[in-house]
Image: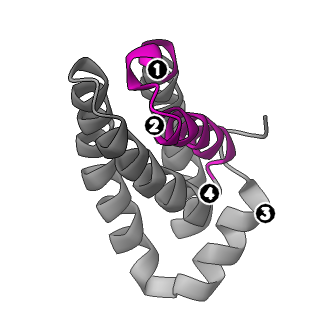
Amino acid sequence: MGTTINETMFEELCDIMEEEMPSLLQTFQDTIPELIEQTGTAIAQHDSDALAKTAHRIKGSSGNLGAERLMAVAFELEQKGRAGEAENAALLQQQLVSEYSQVQNALQNLSRKYLN
């Protein structure tokens, strides 16, 4: 399923973004928890369309940072939404929450390594 954060990709992104990288990370950390909450709401309301759209946003943001496993879980959630199966996605949403916690820890460690 991949790594929590693809370190090579993260390092390359740091080189490209330079002084903007901390801002990118902050935006990610400000946005993703709200989107994860929205996936939970979509599942509770059996709103497959909202689930697919929200999971798609998480997938894209995660992919941009190299958060491979978070991106993979978001992809699975997006597929559930597209298939009209929001009511069957609660376990995946729990995995999303868990994986995001791991991503936060990995980003902290990588930020210390590459941004200081």
Hey, what amino acid is under mark 2?
A: Gly
Residue under circle 3? 8
Q: Earlier in the sequence, mark 4 or mark 1?
A: 1
- Residues at discs 2 and 1 in contact (Cβ within 8 Å): yes
Quick one: 114 or 83, which is closer to the camera? 83
x then y, percent, for residue 88: 46, 15
Q: Earlier in the sequence, mark 4 or mark 2?
A: 2
Label 1 Cα neighbours within 10 Å, binned few <14 / some 14-19 / many ≥20: many
Q: Earlier in the sequence, mark 2 or mark 3?
A: 3
Q: In which quadrant will I find the N terminus?
A: top right
- Residue at 51 percent across and 21 percent down: it is 92
Hey, what amino acid is under mark 3?
A: Thr
x then y, percent, for residue 105: 50, 35
x then y, percent, for residue 50: 30, 44
Q: Which residues are magenta?
A: 67-92
Hey, what amino acid is under mark 4?
A: Lys
- Residue at 25 percent across and 53 percent down: it is 30
Q: CA distance from mark 4 to mark 1?
A: 36 Å
- Residue at 61 percent across and 49 percent down: it is 67
